[in-house]
């Protein structure tokens, strides 16, 4: 006789999904680039839950490597979540943190989206600063190599 297959209740399914999301979020912060990217890809298939985790990783004060993996996951979103992922990346262009802006700009360019020019920060132009060349210091007469001067 075969044992009866027990159906999984909604509560157990939710607990399993919560554990899976926690594990993927932990892998997203991993030091291994391959596991970060794989976790981001798996999160891209998890609809709203995955979007929230990827959004938190992108806008949080995390290393750039984690933000790049989150942007990868957002780029890989499919279906109805694709539009929301593009909105998140567009919001990132206006973020206060420079690394987030750079990651979002690169992700949008990889998707073939045009990034507005005002999102590119110009540090010196805003203050009216201009870099000038410093003239070389004029020294005395140049000494020729191989010519020996004698005293007297």
Image (tube, grey):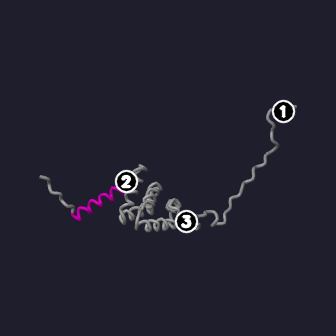
Instruction: Please rate how many residues cluster around mark 1, counting C-alpha atoms within 10 Å: few if below 14, some from 14 to 19, many from 20.
Output: few
Q: Which element carries disc 2, helix, strand or loop?
A: helix
- Magenta span contains residue 98: no
Q: Which mark is residue 4?
A: none
**Which of marks 3 and 2 precedes in the sequence?**
2
Q: Residue at x 55, y 65 (%)?
A: 114
Q: Position of residue 1 (x, y in %)?
A: 11, 52
Real-space CA distance between mark 2 and mark 3, rounded to the nearest whole angstrom: 30 Å
Instruction: Please rate how many residues cluster around mark 2, counting C-alpha atoms within 10 Å: few if below 14, some from 14 to 19, many from 20.
Output: many
Q: Position of residue 56 (x, y in %)?
A: 41, 63
Give the residue pinned by disc 3: 115
User: Which residue occupies the foreground of this view, 148 or 123?
Assistant: 123
Q: Which residues are magenta?
A: 9-26
Q: Residue at x 81, y 41 (%)?
A: 142
Q: Residue at x 82, y 43 (%)?
A: 141
User: Which residue occupies the foreground of this view, 124 or 75?
Assistant: 75
Circles 2, 3 touching at the beta carbon (< 8 Å):
no
**Which of marks 1 and 3 precedes in the sequence?**
3
Real-space CA distance between mark 2 and mark 1, rounded to the nearest whole angstrom: 73 Å
User: Which residue occupies the foreground of this view, 123 or 7?
Assistant: 7
Instruction: Please rate how many residues cluster around mark 3, counting C-alpha atoms within 10 Å: few if below 14, some from 14 to 19, many from 20.
Output: some
| Figure check: 92 above or below 145 | below
Real-space CA distance between mark 3 and mark 1, rounded to the nearest whole angstrom: 66 Å
- Front: mark 2 or 1: 2
Give the residue pinned by disc 1: 149
Give the residue pinned by disc 2: 27
Place residue 72 in its image quadrant.
Answer: bottom left
Characterize the magenta stretch by its predominant secondary structure: helix
Q: Which element carries disc 3, helix, strand or loop?
A: loop
Q: Which element carries disc 1, helix, strand or loop?
A: loop
């Amino acid at each position: 006789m075969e044992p009866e297959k027990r159906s999984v209740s909604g509560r157990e399914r939710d607990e399993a999904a919560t554990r899976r999301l926690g594990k993927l979020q932990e892998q997203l912060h991993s030091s291994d680039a391959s596991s970060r990217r794989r976790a981001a890809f798996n999160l891209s298939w998890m609809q709203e839950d995955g979007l929230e985790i990827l959004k938190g990783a992108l806008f949080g004060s995390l290393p750039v490597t984690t933000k790049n993996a989150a942007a990868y996951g957002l780029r890989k979103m499919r279906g109805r979540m694709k539009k929301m992922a593009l909105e998140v990346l567009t919001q990132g262009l206006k973020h206060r943190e420079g690394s987030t802006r750079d990651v979002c700009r690169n992700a949008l360019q990889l998707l073939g989206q045009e990034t507005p020019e005002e999102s590119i920060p110009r540090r010196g132009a805003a203050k009216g600063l201009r870099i000038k060349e410093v003239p070389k210091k004029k020294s005395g007469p140049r000494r020729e190599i191989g010519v020996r001067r004698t005293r007297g």
